[in-house]
Image (cartoon, rainbow, N blue to C red):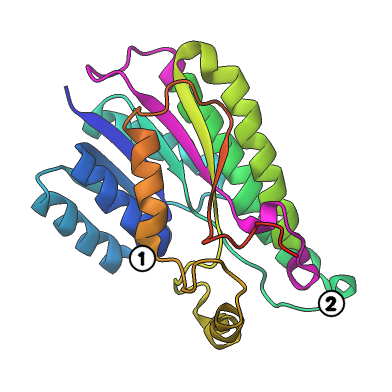
Amino acid sequence: MSRTAIVTGASRGIGHAVALALAAEGFDIAAIALNDAGRLRALEAEVEALGRRCASFDLDIGDIDAHSGVLAAIDERFGGIDCLVNNAGVSVLNRGDLLDVNAQSYDRCFDINTRGTFFLTQAVARSMTTRAPAAEGARSIVFVTSSNAVVASVERGEYCMSKSASSMAARLFALRLASHGIGVFEVQPGLILTEMTAPSKGKYDALIAEGMTATPRWGQPEDVARVIRTMAAGLLPYTVAQEVRVDGGLMIQRF
């Protein structure tokens, strides 16, 4: 019996790397992204080259009314869901003074990073709890949050708050679903080189060179994907509601 993983934000960056890592682990992939059909088609070909099935779906995670239709299509194509990776996310529209944050940027962060992610997880969790797992038995939900779920950045306040709320959602779902044998985890990426972080590359290149991270390099999407693959494979059955920092030591207190 095959296993199926949903990966949101799958067309690029961390999500793309996660989709390929889970395909290599033996999962069929339901890839979700918004307005990125070309990259999703390319991902389908990459997954199929690994011997797994892949179907892509265009979805704005913030549009919770659209969730049910996409989940029904995934169910029709693959059957039950064994893994959900909540990777889709957005940053602020403009970095700047906390006193100047506008409702548009605030709502955008919360609609996608928090509200949409919560209700997608709720729908998937309901499905998981009413179905038997695949033969391999492991079922999991992973929240990809951020170092900013913990560490404040006043130039991106609305992003930090949305990721902090998502971090709490991971703990809550972990407690609710542990008795069903569903592992829920949080991954907190640090400085990962993606299209989202590319505009700040020069700034952080210098900070990394000055020792901002213990490991003196940018993280890569594959660094995050390896951790999520371990979680999805069911190798952490007695680990509940734990966050894993993939940040090269960024968050370690030093003096």
Q: Residue at x 60, y 19 (%)?
A: 176
SS at mark 1 in the image: loop
- Quarter-of-image position of residue 232: top left
| Kind of residue indicated by mark 1 | Asp
- Is 31 or 225 nearer to us in this picture? 225
Q: Name the residue under label 2.
A: 97
SS at mark 2 in the image: loop
Image position, residue 191 (x, y; %): 54, 67
Q: Earlier in the sequence, mark 2 or mark 1?
A: 1
Left or right: where 24 falls relative to 36: left
Mark toward the viewer: 2 or 1:
2
Q: Residue at x 33, y 12 (%)?
A: 132
Image position, residue 149 (x, y; %): 68, 52
Which residue is at the far front?
A: 255
Q: Is residue 135 magenta?
A: yes
Residue 10 can be seen in this image: no
Residue 178, above or below 25:
above
Left or right: where 42 falls relative to 142: left
Image position, residue 129 (x, y; %): 45, 15
Which residue is at the far right?
A: 99
Residue 194, above or below 144:
below
Q: Which residue is drawn at 69% across and 61% down?
A: 159
- Is 103 or 13 nearer to us in this picture? 13
| Kind of residue indicated by mark 2 | Asp
Residue 47 can be seen in this image: yes
Q: Give the range drawn in magenta.
A: 128-157
Checking the image for residue 36, the label placed there is: 1
Q: Residue at x 28, y 66 (%)?
A: 39
